[in-house]
Amino acid sequence: MKTKVFTILFGLVFLCSFVFGQKQPDSTQIAGVASLQLRLSNAVGINWNDRTGTPDIITLASPVVFSSDPRQSAELFLRELVEIQKENPENDRLEFHSLKENRGFSYLKFKQTYKGLPVIGGEYVVTVQNGGGVQTALGLFHKEIRIDVVPTIVAQAALAAARQDSRQELRDSLRESRLVVYSTEEGYFLAWELRIPAAIGFEDWTYVVDAGTGAILAKQSTVINELPMRVPVPDADVYPRHPYLDTSTTYISDFNVAETGYIQGTYADVYNDATSRAYDEDSHFVYTPANTHFDEANLYYHIDNFRRSFWNEIGFDEFTQIIAHAHTTFLDGYGNPAPNASYSLGDHHLRFSDGQSVSGLTPSPKKKRLSCTSTRTR
């Protein structure tokens, strides 16, 4: 574990595991890719999301300038994807949401709507060079939504259903409510998205309630996003770089954890598969490299930092919390050491081992570099 490049390895595992497993693109979409390549005189790389059957990564071999204005260039590029995404022009929209600029690039976020309602999870962030050259689009589009957008129950009825479902007492009032389109493995639903304050304390709950039946589709506490920091500021000791390159550790006096006593926060939650997870009621996670909890602090720091310094910068400000495990033991079917890290399609957790020296899997300047090739790129 001590010889793992946390930032690089996390990025590789994340990018290699960007999908779920269900749907595939149909013949119309495949033909749309071929047509797009001809129109743009460009090689187009597509990473298909198996849950929606639409692209979650679109890359152009050479940047294409649709307009010198970044926003207009991104909008014109997205119009080229109508066939590939199977958009219905009457109902589906990708509406401009925000623009962020960083190191000569513009990152433009577009959010999906269906008949004017937000589609939860539907969005693209388009990367545009200075001068208007479009390079990539990352995100998700939900195709072939066919639902009525007139609710059967009102927001207060949805609140009543949420209060009946909760194991703890919620207030009989709403901070926020809105109608949304929500997807599950069973399909698409018109739903009420509610933010409900708890009766005691500062915790809020977000509930997604079927606007037709009152069934609970999803729920999540906002506690990981809003817990205040303790005084003094939480701290930790981590390797800022690969210890093979730099054996020194760095004291971090602004460790972005929530007030729970555990190594968890808005963007990451870290467990320890070898022992109980780290706990300190004052959030002082200062350990020596020999301590098992040192690795938890390292994982958290680099995942959280990667999320804040990269994904936030390009517009993914609503990304799901990442759950990671330190000290996982990986063995193949023959009892031999297996990869240093893995991503589970079952629970969507990242797991990191203690770095068995498996050929081609342990990052080292003297060994062959890791590669990430998607088998779904057409």
Image: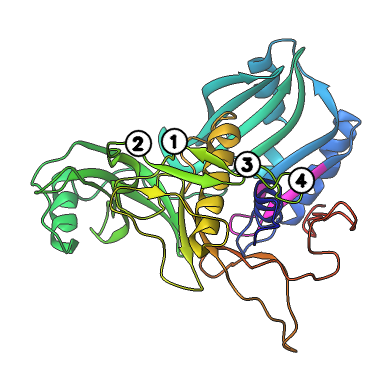
Q: Amino acid at mark 1?
A: Ser
Task: Identify the element where label 4 is drawn.
Answer: loop
Give, as a three-letter code, the residue at label 4.
Leu
Q: Which residues are magenta?
A: 45-55
Name the residue that disc number 4 marks: 245
Q: Is residue 48 magenta?
A: yes
Can you tell which quarter of the image residue 310 is in? top right
- The secondary structure type at the circle numbered 1 is loop
Name the image quarter holding the N terminus.
bottom right
Residue 240: which numbered mark, if any? 3
Using the image, tell me which numbered label, if any, was put on residue 253.
1
Label 1: how many residues lie within 10 Å, few (<14), some (14-19) or many (20+)? some
Work out whether mark 3 precedes mark 4 in sequence or the reverse, and give the earlier one: 3
| 300, 163: nearer the viewer | 300
Of the two numbered discs 1 and 4 on the same chain, state the one appearing first in sequence.
4
Residue shown at the point (24%, 42%) measured from the top left: 195
Q: Residue 110, percent across and down?
A: 55, 29
Q: Which residue is mark 2?
A: 233
